[in-house]
C-alpha cells in the first residue's frame, strides 16, 4: 500500500508539472482532445471568406476544468483577439474595430460578429479565456482565417457577346457565384465567369453566394455626359478656363471634346483647360463619353468670352465729295463683348460731339473740317480711331478729279493730233490735184524773163505757207 501511495503521489506530481508547463504558454486547444485536462477551444469553420461591406460571424466552443491546482477554477473573461506586434489585442478595445465588433457568449459558445468589413480586416482571429487562477489564460490555435474581398468584374466584349469574370481574393473552400443582369439575379450561372449577349444599355454584376446583398460594382456603358465650365461666372479674355465632362460609367469612360466638328481634346479625364482663353475660343463645345461597352450622345455647352473693344472702323456717307451745307453721316463699329458704346469727339474740343454708333452732321460747313475720333468702350476697356474730314477732300472726290483731269488731257491730245492730220491731208491733196503749167514761149527779152522768174518764186512761197 505504501508503494501504491508513492506511485499515486508521483503520478499526481507529474500531472501538476504538466499542467504548470501548459499554463506557461497558451493551450493549443484545437489540437487538444476534449477531456485532456478539461481545456479545449474548437473553431468552426476555420476558414471564412466574406465580402467587403458585409458582416461576418466567427464561432467557437470552449471547455475548462471546474477545479485546477486543487482550487475552484472559474472563467473571469473571454475575448477575441488578433496579434499586433506579437501581442494579443482584445478587438473590443482596438480603435480599428470601434463600434464594429461584438463578443456574444452563451453556454460556452462564443460568437465574434464584425460589421462593415474592410479589406484590412483580413487576418487570423483567436479566442482566449482567462480564469481566476494565476496564469490561467488559454486560447485556441490555430485560429480562424478571415479573408475579406472586394469583388471586381473583368470584362471583354467580342461582337455581340460579353465575357465577364468575377475576381475575388478569397481562397477558402469552394465558392459559388451569383450573377446579375440589370440588377436581376441570373440563378443558373454559378461559376466565376459568364457570357451575356451584348447590349450597351445593360449592366452586369456578380456576388458570392450568401452575400447576395453585397454584389460587385456593376459594369455598364456611359450614361449621358454632364458638362460644366469653370469659373461659372463671366469668362474674360486672358483668364484660365476649364471645361469639365463627366459620365456615369464602369469601367471609367474616356472623353472627347469637339469645337464645331474639330476635335480639341481626348483622354481619360474629362477636363479641357484654356490657360489663357482668347476671343477666338468662344463658341459651342461638345463632349462625348465612351468605354468598351459603348458610347453616349454628345452633350454641349456654349463658351462666351468677354473682351474689350477692338480698333473701331469708321465709314462716311455719302462717300463722294463732301459739299458745303450737305448732310454727312458717320458710322463707327467695333468688335466687343459685351457690346460697345460709342462717343464722338472733335480735335481740340473737350466735350463730346455726340454719343451712339451713328453721328450725323446735317449742315456741313468749312468750320466743321478737322480731325474726329470715335471711341468704343465697354466695362473691359476702350479703343479709339481718328480720321479727318474736310470739304471736297473725300477720297471719291479726289478720284473723280483725277479722272476728269486725265480725260481732259487725253481729249486735248486727240484734238491736236486730228488738226495736224487734217492739215497734212489737205496739203497733200493740193499738191496732187494742181494743173501742170502750159508751156509759154518767152522771148529773149530779159525783162520778161525776170518777171516770169519773180512770179515763180512768189508761187513757191505761197505753197510753202500753206504747208505750214
Image: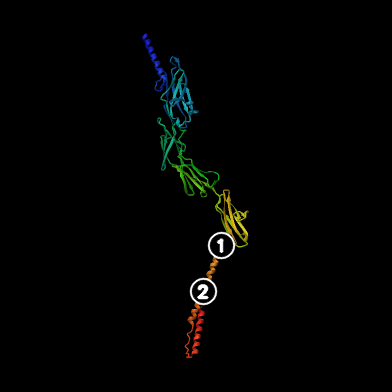
Residue 164 versus residue 139: which sits nearer the camera? 139
Residue 96 image position (x, y, % from top left): 48, 29
Which residue in the structure is indicated by mark 1?
A: 396
Q: Quadrant of the N terminus?
A: top left
Outermost residue on the front side: it is 446
Q: Secondary structure at mark 1?
A: helix
Badge 2 density bin: few <14, some 14–19, many ≥20, Cα 10 Å: few
Residue 348 versus residue 26: which sits nearer the camera? 348
Residue 89 image position (x, y, % from top left): 46, 25
Badge 1 density bin: few <14, some 14–19, many ≥20, Cα 10 Å: some
Q: Residue 232's mark?
A: none
Residue 346 versus residue 85: which sits nearer the camera? 346
Residue drawn at the location 50% of the way across and 87% of the way down: 450
- Please report whichever mark, 2 or 1, sits nearer to the chain's N-terminal start: 1
Residue 302 image position (x, y, % from top left): 52, 47
Q: Give the colour scheme shown.
A: rainbow
**Looking at the image, can residue 446 be seen?**
yes
Q: Residue 418's mark?
A: 2
Residue 298 image position (x, y, % from top left): 49, 45
Q: Secondary structure at mark 2?
A: helix
- The mark tally for this picture is 2
**Eyeballing the image, is 56 above or below 435?**
above
Q: Left or right of 381: which side holds 204?
A: left
**Looking at the image, can residue 1 be seen?**
no
**Eyeballing the image, is 466 above or below 228?**
below
**Eyeballing the image, is 386 above or below 196?**
below
Amino acid at each position: 500500500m505504501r508503494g501504491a501511495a508513492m506511485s499515486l503521489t508521483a503520478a499526481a506530481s507529474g500531472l501538476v508539472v504538466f499542467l504548470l508547463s501548459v499554463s506557461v504558454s497558451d493551450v493549443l486547444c484545437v489540437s487538444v482532445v476534449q477531456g485532456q485536462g478539461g481545456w479545449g477551444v474548437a473553431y468552426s469553420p476555420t476558414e471564412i471568406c466574406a465580402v467587403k461591406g458585409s458582416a461576418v460571424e466567427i464561432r467557437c466552443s470552449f471547455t475548462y476544468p471546474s477545479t485546477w491546482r486543487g482550487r475552484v477554477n472559474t472563467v473571469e473573461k473571454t475575448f477575441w483577439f488578433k496579434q499586433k506586434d506579437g501581442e494579443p489585442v482584445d478587438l473590443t478595445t482596438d480603435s480599428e474595430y470601434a463600434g464594429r465588433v461584438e463578443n456574444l457568449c452563451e453556454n460556452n459558445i462564443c460568437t465574434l460578429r464584425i460589421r462593415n468589413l474592410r479589406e484590412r480586416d483580413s487576418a487570423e482571429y483567436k479566442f482566449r479565456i482567462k480564469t481566476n487562477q494565476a496564469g490561467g489564460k488559454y486560447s485556441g490555435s490555430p485560429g480562424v482565417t478571415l479573408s475579406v474581398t472586394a469583388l471586381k468584374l473583368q470584362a471583354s466584349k467580342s461582337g455581340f457577346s460579353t465575357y465577364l469574370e468575377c475576381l475575388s481574393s478569397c481562397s477558402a473552400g469552394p465558392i459559388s457565384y451569383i450573377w446579375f443582369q440589370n440588377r436581376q439575379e441570373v440563378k443558373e450561372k454559378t461559376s466565376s465567369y459568364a457570357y451575356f449577349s451584348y447590349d450597351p444599355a445593360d449592366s452586369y454584376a456578380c456576388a458570392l453566394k450568401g452575400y447576395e446583398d453585397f454584389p460587385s460594382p456593376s459594369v455598364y456603358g456611359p450614361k449621358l455626359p454632364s458638362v460644366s465650365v469653370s469659373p461659372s461666372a463671366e469668362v474674360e479674355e486672358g483668364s484660365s478656363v476649364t471645361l469639365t465632362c463627366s459620365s456615369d460609367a464602369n469601367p471609367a469612360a474616356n472623353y472627347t471634346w469637339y469645337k464645331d466638328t474639330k476635335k480639341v481634346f481626348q483622354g481619360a479625364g474629362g477636363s479641357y483647360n484654356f490657360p489663357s482663353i482668347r476671343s477666338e475660343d468662344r463658341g459651342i463645345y461638345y463632349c462625348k463619353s465612351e468605354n468598351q461597352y459603348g458610347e453616349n450622345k454628345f452633350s454641349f455647352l456654349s463658351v462666351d468670352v468677354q473682351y474689350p473693344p477692338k480698333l473701331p472702323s469708321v465709314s462716311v456717307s455719302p462717300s463722294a465729295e463732301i459739299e458745303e451745307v450737305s448732310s454727312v453721316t458717320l458710322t463707327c463699329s467695333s468688335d466687343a463683348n459685351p457690346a460697345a458704346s460709342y462717343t464722338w469727339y472733335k480735335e481740340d474740343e473737350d466735350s463730346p460731339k455726340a454719343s451712339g454708333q451713328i453721328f450725323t452732321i446735317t449742315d456741313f460747313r468749312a468750320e466743321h473740317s478737322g480731325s474726329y475720333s470715335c471711341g468704343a468702350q465697354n466695362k473691359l476697356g476702350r479703343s479709339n480711331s481718328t480720321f479727318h474730314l474736310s470739304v471736297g477732300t473725300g477720297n471719291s472726290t479726289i478720284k473723280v478729279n483725277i479722272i476728269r483731269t486725265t480725260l481732259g488731257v487725253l481729249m486735248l491730245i486727240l484734238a491736236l493730233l486730228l488738226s495736224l492730220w487734217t492739215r497734212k491731208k489737205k496739203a497733200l491733196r493740193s499738191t496732187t490735184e494742181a494743173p501742170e503749167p502750159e508751156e509759154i514761149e518767152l522771148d529773149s527779152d530779159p525783162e520778161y524773163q525776170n518777171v516770169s522768174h519773180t512770179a515763180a518764186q512768189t508761187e513757191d512761197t505761197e505753197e510753202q505757207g500753206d504747208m505750214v
